Image: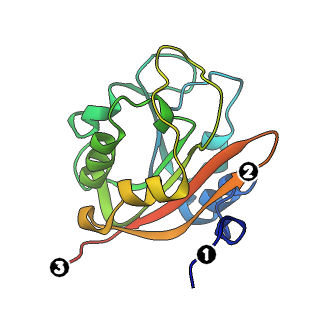
C-alpha cells in the first residue's frame, strides 16, 4: 500500500544519524568523499573528522573554512573528474541551488558506479541566505530529482517534521540501468 507521511521516516539516514551512516560507509582508505556546500556557515563542521580515512574534498561556491575547491555546483564536472567520487554528501544546500536538477546531472557524471549520495535539505524552513534561497523539497521532490533515468537507486528517504527542524532526507546509490 501507499506509505503515509508517518511511515516515510528514513530508516538510517536521519538528521541525527547521517554522520554515523557515512562514517560507517565512507570511512575507508581510498574512498573519494565530496561534500557539496562544505563552508562552515553556522559553526564548525564534523564531516571531515567523521571520515578520517577517506580523501575528503570540501566544495563550495564561496571560499572559507573547510573549503578545498571553490566552484559552482551547477558545473561540478568541470572541477571534479568524471567517475571519480565514491560518496557525495550535502546538507542544507539544495534549497540554495538555482537549478538543482542540473546539479543532480553533474553528480551523476562524477559519481562512480556503486557510489553513494547522501542529501539532507529543508522541507519547510523560513527564508535564509537571501537572495540565494529558491526551493523547498519534500521526499518525492528528491526522489524525482535523483531518478532511475539518471542511474540513481533510492536506498532510504523520508521527511522529518518537528518544531525545530523540517527536513527531507535521501540516500541514493548510483547504478547504471541498461
Contact (CB < 8 A) between labels 3 and 2? no
Left or right of 58 on screen, residue 113:
left
Check disc 2: other Cα within 10 Å, few if <14, some if 14-19, many if 20+.
some
Q: Residue 173, image x and y in percent?
A: 42, 67
Check disc 3: other Cα within 10 Å, few if <14, some if 14-19, many if 20+.
few
- Mark 1 and mark 3: span between their CA atoms? 28 Å
Q: Quadrant of the N terminus?
A: bottom right
- Mark 3 and mark 2: span between their CA atoms? 37 Å
Q: Quadrant of the C terminus?
A: bottom left
- Mark 1 and mark 2: span between their CA atoms? 16 Å
Mark 3 lies on a secondary structure that is: loop
Contact (CB < 8 A) between labels 1 and 3? no
Contact (CB < 8 A) between labels 1 and 2? no
Q: Which residue is mark 3?
A: 178
Q: Which of the labelled discs sits on residue 109, or is there none?
A: none
Q: Which residue is mark 1?
A: 3
Which of the two residues, 44 or 8, is positioned nearer the viewer here? 8
Of the numbered discs 1 and 2, the one sitting upstream in the chain is: 1
Give the quarter of the image for residue 149: bottom left
Residue at (40% x, 31% y) in the render: 97
Of the numbered discs 3 and 2, the one sitting upstream in the chain is: 2
In the depicted structure, whether residue 88 falls above or below residue 153? above
Q: Residue 126, image x and y in percent?
A: 65, 27
Q: Which of the labelled discs sits on residue 161, or is there none?
A: 2
Q: Residue 82, image x and y in percent?
A: 22, 50
Residue at (55% x, 25% y) in the render: 39
Amino acid at each position: 500500500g501507499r506509505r503515509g507521511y508517518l511511515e516515510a521516516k528514513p530508516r538510517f539516514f536521519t538528521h541525527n544519524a547521517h554522520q554515523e551512516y557515512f562514517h560507517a560507509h565512507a570511512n575507508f582508505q581510498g574512498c573519494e568523499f565530496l561534500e557539496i556546500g562544505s563552508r562552515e556557515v553556522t559553526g564548525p563542521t564534523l564531516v571531515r573528522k567523521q571520515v578520517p580515512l577517506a580523501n575528503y574534498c570540501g566544495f563550495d561556491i564561496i571560499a572559507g573554512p573547510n573549503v578545498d575547491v571553490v566552484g559552482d555546483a551547477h558545473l561540478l564536472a568541470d572541477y571534479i573528474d568524471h567517475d571519480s567520487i565514491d560518496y557525495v554528501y550535502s546538507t542544507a544546500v539544495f534549497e540554495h541551488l538555482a537549478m538543482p536538477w542540473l546539479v543532480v546531472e553533474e553528480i551523476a557524471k562524477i559519481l562512480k558506479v556503486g557510489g553513494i549520495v547522501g542529501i539532507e535539505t529543508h522541507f519547510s524552513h523560513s527564508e535564509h541566505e537571501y537572495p540565494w534561497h529558491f526551493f523547498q523539497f519534500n521526499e518525492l521532490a528528491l526522489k524525482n530529482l535523483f531518478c532511475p533515468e539518471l542511474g540513481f537507486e533510492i536506498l532510504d528517504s523520508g521527511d522529518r517534521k518537528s518544531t525545530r527542524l523540517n527536513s527531507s532526507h535521501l540516500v541514493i546509490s548510483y547504478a547504471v540501468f541498461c
